[in-house]
Image (cartoon, rainbow, N blue to C red):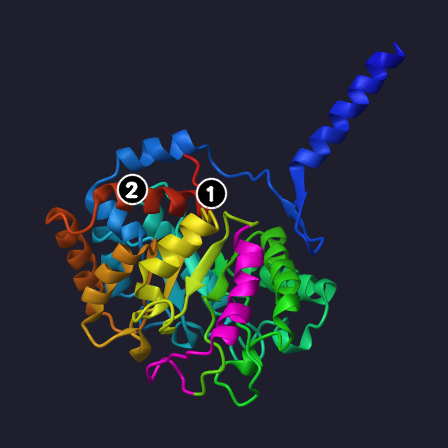
């Protein structure tokens, strides 16, 4: 009888251990997720049209604080799977509740795939909702406990108004206080960023929304705003330190979402990281075995390149991005969809790769058939 009890105890301990794993820094990571089974997702993707699949790969913006004809058309006829809200879309808490519910209702009239409502609510200077309380800048969160508590509270506020994804935390390693990005970072050594960023991701997850680690592989100490000018650096030591937080987290928490940087690091690739298969396929997918969703930073930023945004979207998909963002210019959105579709039809982009991206997106969205 004692042997039976001992055996049961061992099995119980193994069950707990299998539910959790530990990074080298002692961060507990849940490995058993409530994500849908792969066969359910694959079966769903197999029944989707090419138009529907491409739509799921797009995150767009719109100009008004209500559902206008553009966003309604893009959701219903182009099957767009997500939006990125800016301050132009925000008036009040009640207005946000009405807007986000309306977006979900519009999407659910034609699909059972959850609709992504995303935002940059980093805290500090980057806030879309002045009426929310939890807006502490990352640089004022020196411990994992503080980072977790802030993102947990912020995540609960965001979920309450219908937000499903927050584009944060910022995991860039920046040492120059005059840098464009410094005040949005944790402002700590590279080896300390990992635990702080991981804590924030867990806080968002526990609040019931998704976080997004950004901006891979790091903008470094650039002085210029990459929305307005090209960005790059050639300091190998800085690059290695910039990469460390992303590697620490994404090689362990392989089902997270990550946002790319439009940064050129010539020792690795002459292209911005967003358009670089070296960064996205070779490093993220092959070396680190990352299985989560890769999302571009906004393709309308100057630093990503000089060709048209629809052409950039095709390049981004070819490089390995699962989702592309175009927030500001409405007339670009149908063109992006059509450009990706044309590239698939002409054999430039593999539809099998599209399918893999959409499977990752549906897993990230926790798709379950209704």
What is the spatial separation of the Cα atoms under label 2 and label 1, in whole angstroms? 16 Å
Residue picked out by circle 1: 366
Extreme residue in the top direction: 1
Residue picked out by circle 2: 355
Q: Which residues are magenta?
A: 224-251
Asked if the residues shown at circle 2 and circle 1 are in contact, with their CB atoms under 8 angstroms apart, the answer is: no
Decide which of tag 2 and tag 1 comes sooner along the chain.
Answer: 2
Could you classify mark 1 by the number of other residues whose Cα lies within 10 Å: few (under 14), some (14-19), or many (20 or more)?
some
Locate residue 174, reporting x and y percent. Answer: 55, 78
Locate residue 182, reporting x and y percent. Answer: 55, 82
Q: In this view of the protein, can residue 225 be seen by the observer?
A: yes
Q: Is residue 123 left or right of residue 274?
A: right
The quarter of the displayed image where residue 116 is located: bottom left
Q: In this view of the protein, can residue 163 be seen by the observer?
A: no
Extreme residue in the bottom direction: 178
Give 289 or 332, whichever is nearer the viewer.
289
Look at the image and say whether residue 235 sits in the magenta stretch: yes
The quarter of the displayed image where residue 69 is located: bottom left
Q: Helix, strand or loop at disc 1?
A: loop
Q: Helix, strand or loop at disc 2?
A: helix
Q: Residue 7 bears which disc, if any?
A: none
User: Vertical placement of 198 versus 359: above or below?
Assistant: below
Q: Nearer the viewer, mark 2 or mark 1?
A: 2
At x 63%, y 57%, the residue is 203
Give 6 or 161, whichever is nearer the viewer.
6
Locate residue 167, reporting x and y percent. Answer: 48, 64
Look at the image and say whether residue 142 sits in the magenta stretch: no
At x 33%, y 47%, the residue is 357
């Amino acid at each position: 009888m004692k042997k039976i009890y001992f055996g049961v105890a061992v099995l119980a301990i193994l069950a707990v251990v299998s539910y959790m794993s530990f990074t080298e820094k002692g961060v507990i990571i849940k490995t058993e997720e409530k994500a849908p089974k792969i066969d359910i997702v694959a079966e769903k993707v197999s029944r989707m049209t090419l138009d529907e699949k491409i739509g799921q790969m797009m995150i767009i913006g719109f100009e008004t604080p209500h559902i206008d004809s553009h966003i309604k058309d893009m959701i219903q006829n182009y099957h767009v799977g997500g939006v990125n809200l800016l301050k132009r879309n925000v008036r009040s808490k009640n207005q946000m509740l009405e807007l986000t519910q309306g977006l979900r209702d519009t999407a659910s009239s034609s699909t059972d795939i959850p609709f992504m409502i995303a935002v940059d609510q980093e805290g500090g200077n980057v806030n879309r909702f002045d009426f929310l309380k939890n807006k502490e800048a990352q640089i004022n969160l020196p411990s994992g406990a503080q980072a977790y508590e802030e993102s947990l509270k912020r995540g609960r506020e965001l979920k309450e108004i219908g937000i499903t994804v927050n584009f944060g935390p910022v995991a860039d390693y920046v040492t120059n206080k005059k840098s464009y990005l410094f005040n949005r970072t944790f402002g700590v050594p590279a080896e300390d960023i990992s635990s702080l960023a991981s804590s924030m991701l867990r806080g968002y997850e526990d609040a019931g929304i998704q976080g997004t680690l950004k901006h891979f592989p790091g903008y470094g100490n650039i002085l210029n705003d990459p929305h307005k000018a090209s960005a790059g650096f050639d300091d190998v030591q800085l690059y290695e330190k910039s990469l460390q937080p992303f590697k620490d987290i994404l090689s362990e928490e392989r089902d997270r979402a990550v946002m790319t940087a439009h940064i050129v690091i010539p020792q690795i690739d002459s292209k911005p990281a967003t358009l670089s298969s070296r960064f996205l396929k070779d490093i993220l997918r092959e070396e680190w075995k990352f299985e989560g969703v890769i999302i571009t930073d906004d393709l309308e930023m100057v630093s990503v390149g000089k060709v048209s945004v629809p052409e950039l979207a095709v390049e981004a998909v070819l490089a390995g991005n699962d989702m592309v963002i175009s927030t500001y210019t409405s007339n670009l959105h149908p063109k992006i969809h059509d450009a990706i579709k044309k590239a698939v039809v002409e054999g430039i982009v593999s539809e099998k790769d599209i399918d893999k991206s959409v499977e990752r997106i549906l897993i990230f969205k926790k798709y379950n058939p209704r």
